[in-house]
Each structure stands twice: as C-alpha cells, then as structure tokens.
Image: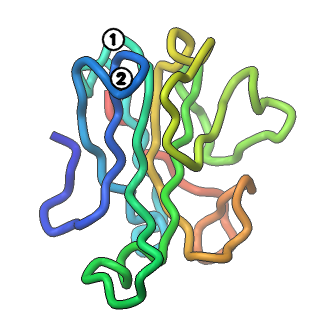
C-alpha cells in the first residue's frame, strides 16, 4: 500500500514482536526532493500496533547491485499522537516520539504507544537523531495520511 513503485528500499513494519504477524512495507519518503515528510497513521496501514520493524539491509560489498541505493540509511520515527510539526523536540524523545535506526525485534512500551510512523533516510555518514529540516532550512512540512 505505502510502497512507492520503483523504489528499491523499504522498511517492513510488523504488528507483533520478533518480526511476526501482519506486515506492511513502507518506502522512505522523499523529503529531500519534495521538501515534505509523509507520516502514516498505523490505522491507515492496517496495523493495530507496531511490535517490530526491519530496515533495509546495508551491504558491505561495493559491488552489490543495490549498494548505490543502500548508501542511505533508513530511519523510522514513531509518535504517540498525531504530530503537528516536522520539528522533533529533543526533550520529547522517549515520551512523545521515538526513533529507530536498526532492525528492532521488540519495540517494548512503544509497541502499544505508537500511533503514527514515518520512514525516511539520510546519506551514509550524515548526522542522525537530529531535527530534520527541508533543503532550504525551513521546518519540514508534514503530510499526515490518516
């Protein structure tokens, strides 16, 4: 449903721990090109909860056919309630939002708390865990898909 045609990398979200249960694949939004971030409600994705997630593989082999696409690292940001802004308040981490940068077999408390999710990416070596902004330095515009 949320996977964009022609996109080779995606995150897979599962409604149960240990990569089990109903699953949906989401391609990272194109916030660098489009200047906007796409946030999905779990209800829209058909998930009651978010129990675990898998991010795209990161092949070490530079000859790997997907290496050029996987030089970007995927992230998943989840919110406990509908996000109102693209700014991630550092003081809200762990209370209003959480970010995952690797396969996570059990989201713990966030499995039940997560209501909204965004899959996005950064270039290899970029600073992660920051407040993303659009290319012109303006705050990210969120498109929330309910």
In the rendered image, the vertical position of residue 96 relative to residue 133, given as above or below: above
Q: Residue furthest front?
A: 61
Asked whether disc 2 touches disc 1, contact meaning CB atoms under 8 Å apart, the reply is yes
Please tell me in which quadrant of the rendered image residue 40 appears: top left
Q: Residue visible at 79% across and 40% down?
A: 89
Local secondary structure at mark 1:
loop
Where in the figure is residue 72, as x and y percent of width and height? 48, 72
Residue at 34 percent across and 18 percent down: it is 15
Q: Is residue 39 above or below residue 43?
A: below
Q: Nearer the viewer, residue 46 or 13?
A: 13
Q: Position of residue 8 (x, y in %)?
A: 23, 66
Q: Which residue in the protein does label 1 denote?
A: 48
- Mark 1 crowdedness (10 Å alpha carbons): few <14, some 14-19, many ≥20: some
Label whose residue precedes the other's in the sequence (2 or 1) = 2
State the image coordinates of residue 61 (x, y, percent, origin top left): 41, 82
Q: CA distance from mark 2 to mark 1?
A: 6 Å
- Mark 2 crowdedness (10 Å alpha carbons): few <14, some 14-19, many ≥20: many
Where is residue 143? Give x, y as percent.
41, 44
Q: Residue at x 58, y 27 (%)?
A: 79
Query: In which quarter of the view is residue 1 placed?
Result: top left
Q: Which residue is mark 2?
A: 42
């Amino acid at each position: 449903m949320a996977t964009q045609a022609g996109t080779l990398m995606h995150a897979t979200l599962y409604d149960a721990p240990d990569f089990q249960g109903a699953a949906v694949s989401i391609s990272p939004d194109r916030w660098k090109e489009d200047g906007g971030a796409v946030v999905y409600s779990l209800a829209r994705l058909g998930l009651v909860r978010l129990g675990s997630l898998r991010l795209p593989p990161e092949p070490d082999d530079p000859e790997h056919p997907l290496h050029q696409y996987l030089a970007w690292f995927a992230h998943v940001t989840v919110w406990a309630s509908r996000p109102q802004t693209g700014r991630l308040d550092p003081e809200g981490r762990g209370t209003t939002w959480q970010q995952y940068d690797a396969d996570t077999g059990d989201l713990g408390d966030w499995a039940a708390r997560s209501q909204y999710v965004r899959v996005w990416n950064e270039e290899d070596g970029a600073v992660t865990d920051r407040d993303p902004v659009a290319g012109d330095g303006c705050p990210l515009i969120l498109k929330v898909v309910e």
